[in-house]
Image (cartoon, rainbow, N blue to C red):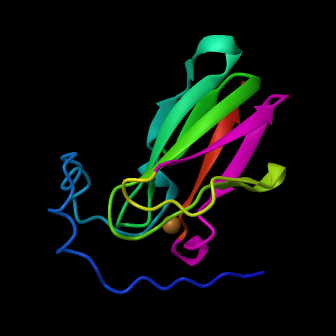
């Protein structure tokens, strides 16, 4: 069930379309996808003991944050897409996914992180562009 979605070159035109002012935040011109680009986010505790984090998927095929720090327990991940390219977020080990998320239509997935450790997540559309991240549970 390998899905292939090849986004047409949309860079440039779409970046000004968003209302969130996100464009330009990563305009350093640095490419390469190495681990130097850790963007760390910490899940916040919510009602009912469920932790929450919002992750953005952008036109550079990157998640922000791409390192999520959480505690053992339930975590709800909300994925928003900032540009025209759809993304998803799948926690690989748990086979849990948001499904395809388009701009303006966030998707959520709740995972039960019962034990400490590292849980990788990916965008299944852009694995070849290394659109990945990790949840660090401790
Ligand atoms: Cu993606």
Q: Which quarter of the picture shows residue 72?
A: top right
Q: Is residue 29 above or below residue 78?
A: below
Q: Residue 117: percent from the left, percent from the top?
A: 78, 35
Front residue of 71/6: it is 6
| Quarter placement of the C terminus | top right
The picture quadrant where one finds residue 69 is: top right
Whether residue 49 is in magenta: the answer is: no
Residue at image point 55% right, 26% down: 43
Q: Nearer the viewer, residue 84 or 28?
A: 84
The location of residue 86, given as percent across then percent down, is 46, 68
Q: Residue at x 80, y 29 (%)?
A: 116
Residue 109 % position (x, y)? 66, 44
Horizontal side of 30 relative to 66 (left or right) equals left
Instruction: Please provide the residue range marked out in magenta.
Output: 106-129
101 shown above or below 138: below
The residue shown at (48%, 86%) is 6
Q: Nearer the viewer, residue 110 or 28?
A: 110
Q: Is residue 24 left or right of residue 37?
A: left
Asked which quadrant contains residue 126, the reply is bottom right
- Can you give x and y, in whole percent of width and height, for residue 44 in the image? 54, 20
């Amino acid at each position: 069930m390998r899905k292939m979605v090849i986004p047409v070159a949309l860079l440039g035109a779409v970046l000004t379309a968003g209302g969130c002012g996100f464009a330009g935040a990563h305009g350093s011109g640095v490419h390469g996808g190495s681990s130097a680009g850790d963007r760390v986010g910490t899940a916040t505790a919510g009602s009912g003991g469920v932790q929450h984090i919002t992750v953005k998927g952008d036109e550079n095929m990157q998640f922000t944050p791409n390192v999520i720090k959480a505690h053992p327990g339930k975590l709800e991940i909300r994925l928003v897409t900032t540009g025209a390219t759809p993304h998803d977020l799948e926690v690989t080990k748990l086979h849990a996914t948001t499904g395809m998320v388009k701009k303006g239509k966030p998707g959520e997935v709740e995972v039960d992180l019962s034990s400490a450790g590292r849980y990788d997540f990916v965008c299944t559309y852009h694995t070849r562009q290394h659109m990945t991240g990790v949840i660090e549970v401790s």
